[in-house]
Amino acid sequence: MRAPIDRLASDQGQRLEVQRVNLRREPAVAWELGVTVCPSYIAFRDGQEVFRAAYPTSAERIAAELEECLDMSPADPQVFAER
């Protein structure tokens, strides 16, 4: 999933930021976000979660959901965290 997510972020330019977190090295982040399955994908908008998916999922589903989130307010950068 790394390549499709990177492609999606690249295609969106400044509208999408991808951050990856290694949950073995940062277990507090997993606990804070309630992540129990890896990989998990979480999108935030203005600090609020707007989308969550976990393995198994597809790049197409994530892209469609993120596109919908991005369309909410095209001027604001979105953060998509791949955990």
Image: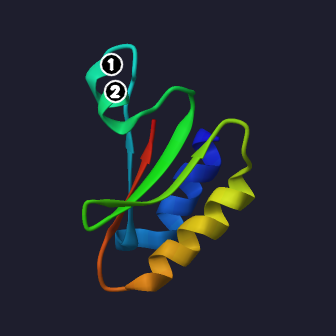
Quarter of the rendering occupied by the C terminus:
top left
Which residue corresponds to mark 2? 31
**Pointer 1: residues within 10 angstroms few (<14), some, or many (20+)?**
few
Residue 46, numbered circle: none
Mark 2 residue type? Trp
- Could you say which quadrant of the image residue 23 lies in? top left
Spot occupied by residue 2 in the image (x, y as percentages of width and height) = 58, 40
Report if the CB atoms under discs 1 and 2 are less than 8 Å apart. Answer: yes
Gap in angstroms between the C-alphas marked 1 and 2: 6 Å
Spot occupied by residue 6 in the image (x, y as percentages of width and height) = 53, 51
- The residue at 49%/83% (across/down) is 71
Q: Is residue 42 left or right of residue 21?
A: right
Dot in front, 1 or 2? 2
Which residue corresponds to mark 1? 27
Spot occupied by residue 70 in the image (x, y as percentages of width and height) = 46, 76
Secondary structure beneath dot 2 equals: helix
- The residue at 39%/14% (across/down) is 24
Mark 1 residue type? Pro
